[in-house]
Image: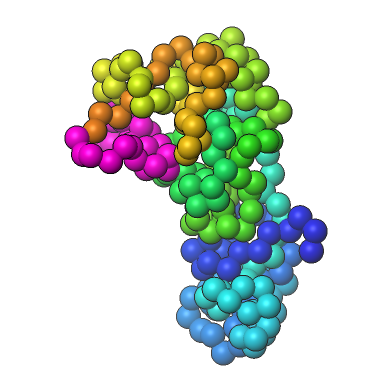
Amino acid sequence: MGDELLVWSLRAIEEALKAKHPAQSLYLLKGGGGRLEGLAQKAREQGIKVVKVPKEHLARYSHEHQGAVLILSPVGFLPWQERLREVRERGEAPLFLALDGVVDVGNMGAILRSCEVLGVHGVIFPKRRSAPITSGVVRASAGAIFHLPVDRVSNLTTTLRAMKKEGLWIVGTHLQGEQVPYGVDLTLPLVLVMGSEEKGLSPLVRDTCDFLIRIPMKGKTASLNVAASTAVFLYEVQRQRGGFP
């Protein structure tokens, strides 16, 4: 099947169809009704082939299927420059997230889900030392990836420097960050940079940041994982920007 993606989570399939992501086939469990029939109707409206099959056929794709498997085209990438232009044309303060070495599929998916829910305009990650956009990432994101522009770049440090020239502030996250998120202005045009689970920000990326922020903690564990930390930082960004009532 080449580079095609397989999606077997019902939630992710629903989001893919809602976003009208290009797809080839939807395989559904014979005799399944209700929610599955709703998926079939949406798929047919978009010209996607719908095939009713026994559960043994679905199990060839995944033993974790929920009665459906969608075969769709790979997730495409949108250059950050193009996305930045769109955001500015709408008169919004840009908010991008950059990932420096996040290789865990579960973390990548959870981060993308938080980004979509919390209003990130686009996610940037390097071609190397990053989790690829696979079926596992799609599932972990609960299909949020289909609603979120992403860009895969050759060199993250070079990209961040270019974004800085475009007037964006580069804010890194680090356990030893000098400031806490609620103590700095996060309403500015912003790129929030999250580091890898094990090593955090790489030295070159860290040196590119305008300043570093940290999450103050009261417990005894070393830190939150990168996915949870991302959600905390993004919530504070939107709180400052008046994104919540």
In this image, 47 relative to 208: left or right? right
Q: Looking at the picture, how far across and down is residue 80, in whole percent? A: 62, 28
**Count of number-bearing discs:** 0
Residue placed at 26% from the left, 18% from the top?
Answer: 183
User: Going by the picture, which residue comes out furthest to the right?
Assistant: 2
Q: In terms of depth relative to the viewer, which is nearer, 66 or 43?
A: 66
Residue placed at 46% from the left, 26% from the top?
Answer: 192
Residue placed at 61% from the left, 64% from the top?
Answer: 7
Q: Looking at the picture, how far across and down is residue 45, in whole percent? A: 65, 67
The segment highlighted magenta reads: 218-245
Residue 24 falls in image quadrant? bottom right
Q: In which quarter of the image is the C terminus?
A: top left
Q: Looking at the picture, how far across and down is residue 95, in whole percent? A: 47, 27
Q: Is residue 207 visible?
A: yes
Q: Which colour scheme is used?
A: rainbow
In this image, 42 relative to 34: left or right? right
Q: In terms of depth relative to the viewer, which is nearer, 188 or 176?
A: 176
Is 240 in the magenta? Answer: yes
Residue 100 falls in image quadrant? top right
Is 68 in the magenta? Answer: no
Image height check: is 177 above or below 59? above
Q: In terms of depth relative to the viewer, which is nearer, 169 or 229?
A: 229
User: Going by the picture, which residue comes out furthest to the left?
Assistant: 218
Residue placed at 76% from the left, 55% from the top?
Answer: 3
Image height check: is 205 above or below 149? above
Image height check: is 229 above or below 193? below
Q: Quadrant of the N terminus?
A: bottom right
Q: Can residue 14 be seen in this view?
A: no
Q: Looking at the picture, how far across and down is residue 164, in whole percent? A: 55, 13
